[in-house]
Image (cartoon, rainbow, N blue to C red):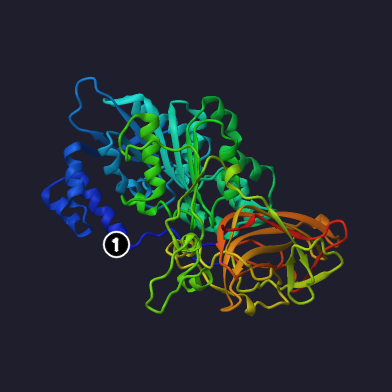
Amino acid sequence: MSADGTTETPFALSADDLAKLDAIREALLEPSPRRIGRLDQWGLADTYETYAEIARYSEVSLTMADGTVLDAFLSMPRNLAPGQTCPAVVLPAPLINIGHRAYLGMIFRWALGGYVVLAYSQRGLAMSTGEIHVAGPRDVADASEVIDWLAQQEGVDADRIGFFGSSYGAGTSLLAAAQDRRIKAVAGTSAWADLFASLYENGTRHLKAFEALVQLFGEDRCSQEFREVIQKIRSNTIDDQVTEFAAQRSPKNHLDTYNDAATPVLLTTAWHETIFSVPAVIDFHNRLTGPKTLLVQVGDHGNAELPGLAGLPAKPTDMAYRWMDHHLGGSAGDGATPRFDVRTEYMFNPLSDLRHLGGSAGDGATPRFDVRTEYMFNPLSDLRHPSWQEYALPKKRFHLAGAREDGQLSESGPQAGWTRSVKATGKGTDIVVAPKLVQTGLAERLGLPHVYKTADIDRGLAAVFTTTQLPHASRVRGELELQVTLMSQQADATIVAYLLDHDPVTGRAHIITHAPCTVTAEHRGQATTVNVPLQPADYVVPKDHQIQLVIDTHDPFYAYDNTTTPVFTIDITSPTGTESYLDIPLHPID
């Protein structure tokens, strides 16, 4: 249970998903007609009948040097010729109570590609013994011991070993590759690069996501060090122990090692990721000099690879198969050579907005899909660019102006001399990062982004700034930055900035991006100019829509000291010389 008493479990699998995994496991352990036949209700009987012909599955216990036992499964190809060896892929588990069983749906593709597969649950997770260290030094040492054991198995080519992981498994894989050069390629989906930035953004704790992760770990299974860090993050004691704990577990701090070894690294993340820092993943990718690929998709943490983990087509896992094939010599993928680039999807709007783009909907007529409508309504959009620098569009500056009621986002030049006061009451508006961790992003990925009504915003609690209606359908693509001056008599005053796509006809709005910022105690009572990088975005805004900036004082996603005083005021200002503005990479679609 989290600090606020909630028991939300955003990563829970459905009863049917769990039943399917149990049936797959039983068929792998005993590939009898009865066991395999049970899989027919999910259309998987033929798949695992073929698996039983080409590979054999076993569950193993791996004992580490300190006596910790890691729960694992091993898949070995059948009918190898004398002396024949195969590439191997190691799969550290994602953060889920079923541990390595989360990868059972992938086993057929790996086996069909000629791989030895070893999946394991990290210490303290699922059925493994020991305590949870959050991809710390002991987990990295475990990964090397796992490789030692694997390399001794007959048929394994010790020179062709790769690591694939999702979420917690992605971080474990990246950190292991920094310490053990026997790992020849890494693919990490829903990865992290900077753990501190994921926990503490612009002076603001990501407490809701942090509590969700702690709940999944199980606080009673965590190491003493981690339990101390948990309590310090909850109490906002961000000291050397917390920063060092995060630094040891941040792949970005091993850049020289990856680059010296030219380790091939594939990373995936999501535009509305609520668990790990997206800017940190992008920056990490940009600084890698070896073979690399970055995929950024619509949705939230784990949404895009979920079908792939279940054995279905998905960009993250399909790219991982291709990645390992290229670097290790297997054949699990489609035979195509991977592209070393930046691959993205853009965020799209529902069909109710089609009228703004020259098509039609709801009248039985066939919509006219020109270039602009294709940009809007293709949930499987697929853009490729050689690098992030070539992908991101130049920024355009919008100045915050006239904030007496609703202000404007104006291109007409700096606007100084205004002040807009908002109250921090411990309760914000209905504009939030995500009503539900992970699940809101999943709905967005399915074409159902959350709808906000900005007309209902209490202007006493938030400041709103709006552009004129856009004369063309336009794309927001790349990094954004807000400069604003704040003054509060309260220590550690927090704001959250949201950028929204607003339809002035319906009053409906969808979130494009956001970021929090906390002005710390030493700036209390002073006018403090802050520059706040917002989460990068790729979003198409329809013709005649507006872009809205909402500056709020509370979001349940973040932790606040705004609640220590019942009510206080935060002044948002624009002094001469440090006028407030928002840089947006906004350009019309040709």
Residue sitting farthest toward the top? 83
60 or 250, which lies in front?
250
| Location of residue 500 with respect to 158 vertically, above or below | below
Residue sitting farthest toward the left? 33
| Location of residue 238 with respect to 252 vertically, above or below | below
| Location of residue 20 with respect to 151 vertically, above or below | below
Residue type marked 1:
Asp
Q: Is residue 297 left or right of residue 492?
A: left
Q: Which image quadrant for residue 28?
A: top left
Q: Please report the residue visible at 32 percent of the width from the left and 32 percent of the height from the top.
A: 330
279 or 156, which lies in front?
279
Residue 128 appearing in the image:
no
Assess disc 1: are there few (<14), some (14-19) or many (≥20) residues with their C-alpha within 10 Å of its C-alpha.
Answer: few
Q: Which image quadrant for residue 157?
A: top left
Q: Please report the residue visible at 51 percent of the width from the left and 60 percent of the height from the top.
A: 347
Residue 298 point in image, percent of width and height: 49, 57
Residue 356 point in image, percent of width and height: 53, 71
Q: Is residue 241 left or right of residue 116?
A: right
Q: Which residue is mark 1?
A: 16
Question: For the C terminus, which image quadrant?
Answer: bottom right
Q: Please report the residue visible at 20 percent of the width from the left and 42 percent of the height from the top.
A: 51
Residue 376 appearing in the image:
yes
Q: Which image quadrant for residue 9?
A: bottom left
